Image (cartoon, helix red, strand yellow):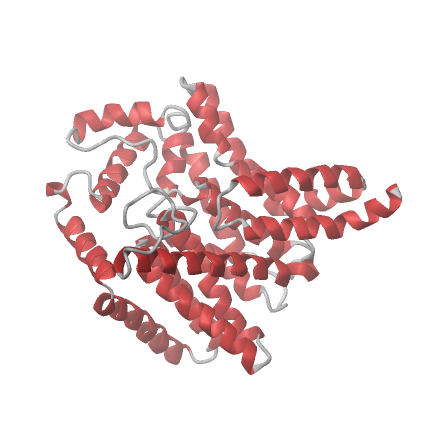
């Protein structure tokens, strides 16, 4: 009986992994419980030597472990160890990459994507209900809505984390529409999902997520018309401009977000503590911090302490913050140049790495293409749901893959 259970564990863990994919746009707690259960089954299964050899041969395992370690090491020169341990834990999903990579099954990749898209579809339905309750029928009962902002329509996580997940879902729906669907009915299904995802992005209000979606949409067009780059450029431009113009003309909320964003950008010095103004000030003060401690950083637990000092000198009218809202500056200020090099490697290595032409090569490029630009506007690799999304998809995309020779 024990032997039979051990033989079935890979299939059980693969289904549990699909459950982790389903939890990406939801609260992160179920993902932790499912990951703990996966680990228990992984240990019961045995075959340690075989599994550890496979992990040792995968470069992303070492890269992600190094990325976590560089922040953990910075605890050595951190004064506030309690906060430092808490912030180090935000990189925890990079350690879980090894577990996800070990249990992911190459033949089940479609299952993982479907689980993610199903969760997104459910969240979109709830978000549309919330939007209708806020803007059309206020007498409707309150829906499931995250308690972040009065205008946030996302059901479980705020728009900062919700919209990048939507962006990837839109790309995956488009990829299935253009490259994978074999029947008219399936094409219609993914066309509808792509449309509802686009509309959800326009009502959600997350500007970085929308930017990431437009970048992925352009990438998808270039992948579809790889042999006709001029046509791809024209189509990508028309689609991007059409989405933005349509949203601006058809949604009061989207138009307000755009107008407010432009005003905050142009007049940020006269608009203390506004969204875009704060990001500009965070970035300038974070760069000052990095310039003072370029090699080792201030230590992951002392960012707020040191930022408060710099802020009091240069921008006292602005509120201090524990996070520069920029992944690159987050790494540089907390753990110095080594962390900066590693965050670039974490994002760029999956982009340039050579893999097989197996129908998934386009998606392997899409994930870093999404994160590279949006990480300018937020420290997304330390945001639980999105660092989980990045790690999970890379594990599923590279498991069982043998790299092509250069």
Q: Is residue 238 left or right of residue 197?
A: left
Q: Name the residue at 62% across, 68% down.
A: 357
Q: Is residue 374 visible?
A: yes
Q: Quadrant of the N terminus?
A: top right
Vertical comparison of 329 with 231: above or below: above
Q: Please identify the quarter of the rendering in which residue 194 is found.
A: bottom left
Percent x, y for residue 110? Answer: 62, 63
Which residue appears at 32% of the width and 53% of the height? 206
Q: Looking at the image, which is closer to me, 393 or 60?
A: 393
Question: Can the viewer see residue 64 in this picture?
Answer: no
- Residue at the extreme top: 79
Q: Residue furthest bottom?
A: 184
> In this image, 386 relative to 202: left or right?
right
Q: Quadrant of residue 36?
A: top right
180 or 202, nearer to the observer? 202
Query: In the displayed image of the protein, which residue is found farthest to the left?
Result: 270
392 w.r.t. 357: above or below = above
Q: Is residue 332 above or below residue 9?
A: above
Quadrant of the rendering where the C terminus is positioned: bottom right
Q: Position of residue 223 (x, y in %)?
A: 48, 72
Locate residue 327 relative to residue 223 in the image: left or right.
left
Q: Whole-percent x and y of residue 272?
A: 15, 38
Q: Position of residue 191 (x, y in %)?
A: 46, 74
Residue drawn at x 48%, y 25% is 85
């Amino acid at each position: 009986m024990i032997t039979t259970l051990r033989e079935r564990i890979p299939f059980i863990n693969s289904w549990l992994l699909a459950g982790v994919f389903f939890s990406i746009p939801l609260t992160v707690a179920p993902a932790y419980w499912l990951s703990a259960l996966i680990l228990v089954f992984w240990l019961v299964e045995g075959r340690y030597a075989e599994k550890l050899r496979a992990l040792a041969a995968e470069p992303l395992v070492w890269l992600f472990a190094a990325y976590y370690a560089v922040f953990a090491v910075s605890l050595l020169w951190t004064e506030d160890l309690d906060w430092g341990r808490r912030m180090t834990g935000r990189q925890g999903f990079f350690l879980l990459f090894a577990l996800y990579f070990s249990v992911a099954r190459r033949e089940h990749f479609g299952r993982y994507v479907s689980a993610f898209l199903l969760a997104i579809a459910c969240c979109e339905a709830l978000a549309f209900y919330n939007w209708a309750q806020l803007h059309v029928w206020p007498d409707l009962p309150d829906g499931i809505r995250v308690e972040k902002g009065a205008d946030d329509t996302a059901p479980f996580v705020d728009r900062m984390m919700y919209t990048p997940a939507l962006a990837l879902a839109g790309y995956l729906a488009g990829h299935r529409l253009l490259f994978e669907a074999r029947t008219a009915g399936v094409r219609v299904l993914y066309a509808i999902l792509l449309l509802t995802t686009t509309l959800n992005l326009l009502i959600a209000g997350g500007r970085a997520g929308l930017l990431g979606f437009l970048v992925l949409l352009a990438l998808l067009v270039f992948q579809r018309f790889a042999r006709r780059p001029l046509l791809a450029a024209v189509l990508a431009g028309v689609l991007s401009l059409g989405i933005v113009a349509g949203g601006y003309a058809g949604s009061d909320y989207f138009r307000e977000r755009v107008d407010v964003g432009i005003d905050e950008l142009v007049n940020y010095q006269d608009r203390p503590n506004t969204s875009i103004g704060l990001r500009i000030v965070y970035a300038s003060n974070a760069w000052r911090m990095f310039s003072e401690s370029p090699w080792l950083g201030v230590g992951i637990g002392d960012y707020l302490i040191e930022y408060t000092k710099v802020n009091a000198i240069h921008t006292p009218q602005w509120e201090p913050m524990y996070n520069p809202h920029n992944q690159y500056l987050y790494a540089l200020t907390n753990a110095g140049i080594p962390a900066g090099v590693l965050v670039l490697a974490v994002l760029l290595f999956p982009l340039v790495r050579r893999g097989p032409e197996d129908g998934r090569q386009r998606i392997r490029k899409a994930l870093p293409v999404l994160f590279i630009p949006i990480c300018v506007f937020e420290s997304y690799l330390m945001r639980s749901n999105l660092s989980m999304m990045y790690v999970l998809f890379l594990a599923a995309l590279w498991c069982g893959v043998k790299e092509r020779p250069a």
